[in-house]
Image: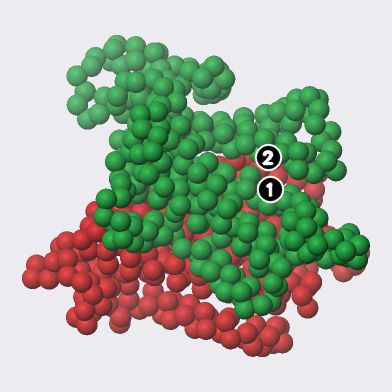
Amino acid sequence: MSFAYLVRRVVTSIPTVLFVAFVVFITIHLVPGNVVDMMLGTQNYLTQEQIDQLYKEYGLDKPLIVQFGIWLKNIATLDFGTSLRTGKKVINLIMDRFPVTLELSVLSMFFATIIGVPLGIVAAVKRNSFVDGVLRVVGLIGLSSPSFWVGAILIVIFAGLFQGFNIFGYVRLKEDFLKNLQVMFLPSLTLGLMLSAQIMRMTRSSMLDALQQEYIKTAKAKGVSHSKVIGKHALKNALIPIITLSGIQLGYLLAGTIVIENMFALPGLGRLLLQAVNERDYPVIQFVVMFIALLIVVLNIVVDFIYTLVDPRVELR
Amino acid sequence: MNRTVRKFLKNPFNMIFLLILISVLMVAVFPDLFARYGPYSMDYDAVLEGPSLKHLFGTDQFGRDIFSRCVFGLQKSVIIAFSSILFASVIGTVLGLIAGYYGGVWDLIIMRICDGFFAFPSLILALFIVALFGSSLLNLIIAIGIVYVPIFARTVRGATLSVRESLFVKASKVIGKSNFKIMLTDVLLNLSSVLIVTFTTNLSTAFLTEASLGFLGLSVPPPEPTLGGLVGQGTAFLLSAPWITLFPGFVIAVVVLSLNILGDGLRDVLDPKNR
């Protein structure tokens, strides 16, 4: 893990970031009408001069390529503009909502790992047994179920079983830690269950790969205990694909949070995005989408780094 | 091919879910045969009623029959998911063929663009496009389809790279076949099994993406029913009338599960490694 690698990795992701920025920029410009038209609405009391002034203010009078340059500069300096509806700075809106999404993602990943990895190990060790078969079916069902359906089932079950359970009504982490965890429990469990199906399948197949290696036979021949062979020799080597998958999933997780946040009324990024979509608040939409794409690029770099921590054989150059 | 089909059907699992999927398709193609009520017909004497013989999946707050709405919603969802993957497979295959067959600059440009698209989570890209251009049927198909173009392009490119070096492609070149013809016949025919598997597995996720958009209220606008939309509108009554939400969700899960199992089954049969 060297500094040079970090620099190279960041440099090679620049084209991706530029492309993403370009797509978001050009898509917004393909929409009929622009920000000024949007603000004016159908009732137009402004003179042509005032309209021209507004065009100038938003840089809409400049050529497209210059506008793209300004857009890039704005992203780089985190100057995300202001919301058309609330007049608040978009960067403040994002920073206000992001912690909720982050907490939801981390907790979901936690549930997914503590459910998925052990079940995957069991399925691999008991390969082709009844248990393996049941887990395969359960995993497929998990992969196939829409998250909002799983969430609805969990809500119905929890509301029936625990009368006083706080399902809705978000409380900030800083305000009341326990209440916050209670509200976050069901949404995270929902997303976690969805992800655990994939993690379980991946754990199973990469454990099976690892268990067939020569060094496992050697370890067994040396008389290493069964649990040690599985836990230390096999699992450690099976971890790489599992981490890759978890890394990829973080992106999907961010998408999944849109649905779940709206289902459980959590004030995260996903809810902000959908609100903006419903209110046609273009600056908010474009920067939230941009922010999420940037986040995924950064996460991919982070995942690469985690490899080296798990597997010293992986040399990043 | 005959042996492959027989091998595929020998697995009872595949057989059962193939039958389920065929019946789902039948319902989607002939909704009027299966729905006892119209998708919009309201019955104010039967508001928020639970499942019964008269209303198999219960009714919603306007007394609309959930089963009938599921049937018509299924039709919409199937059309959108299938068309979007069809769109993605055609464009993705062409791009993948060009990138894999010609290589060089083409390969570089096409693959970098695909990498860029991978930075967007599928739901967010689709949501972005629908949010900007409106949720007409065509927009939905394109919005969901674009997400899958890079997946097809990448898969086809990888497979093309290996086929390109094979002897029969070289032979075709020697006898003077044009590049276009080689790509269309020699290369594409050899990719058919890869394409079938990619098509089926991605069809299931496209179905889920459409359902998620519907849940968020961004698929075909109400009152027209979509499966995801039914779930989304039902959540307001989740604790008093859970059937509005749970049944349409169940239908989505069954369709996606069938597609996933068939995709797995097809992969087992068609993958040369398992032959």
B207 or A6, nearer to the observer = A6
Colour of chain A, in one word, is: green
Three-letter code, disc 2? Val
Residue A6 appears anywhere in the view: yes
Using the image, name the chain to which the residue with label 2 belongs: A
Q: Amino acid at mark 1?
A: Thr
**Residue A269 coordinates in the image, percent (x, y):** 42, 36
Residue shown at 56% from the left, 84% from the top? B15
Left or right of B191: which side holds B214? left
Q: What residue did someone put label 2 on?
A: A303
- The disc label shown at residue A244, or none: 1
Instruction: Please identify which colour was used for chain B in the image.
Output: red
CA neighbours of label 1 inside 10 A, class few (<14), some (14 to 19), many (20+): some
Across the whole image, how many numbered discs are drawn on residues?
2
Mark sitting earlier along the chain (1/2) = 1
The quadrant where residue A266 appears = top left
Q: Residue at x 75, y 65 (%)?
A: A208
Circle 1 — which element? helix
Residue at (36% x, 32% y) in the render: A176
Left or right of B153? Residue A135 is left
Distance (Cα) linking label 1 and label 2: 7 Å
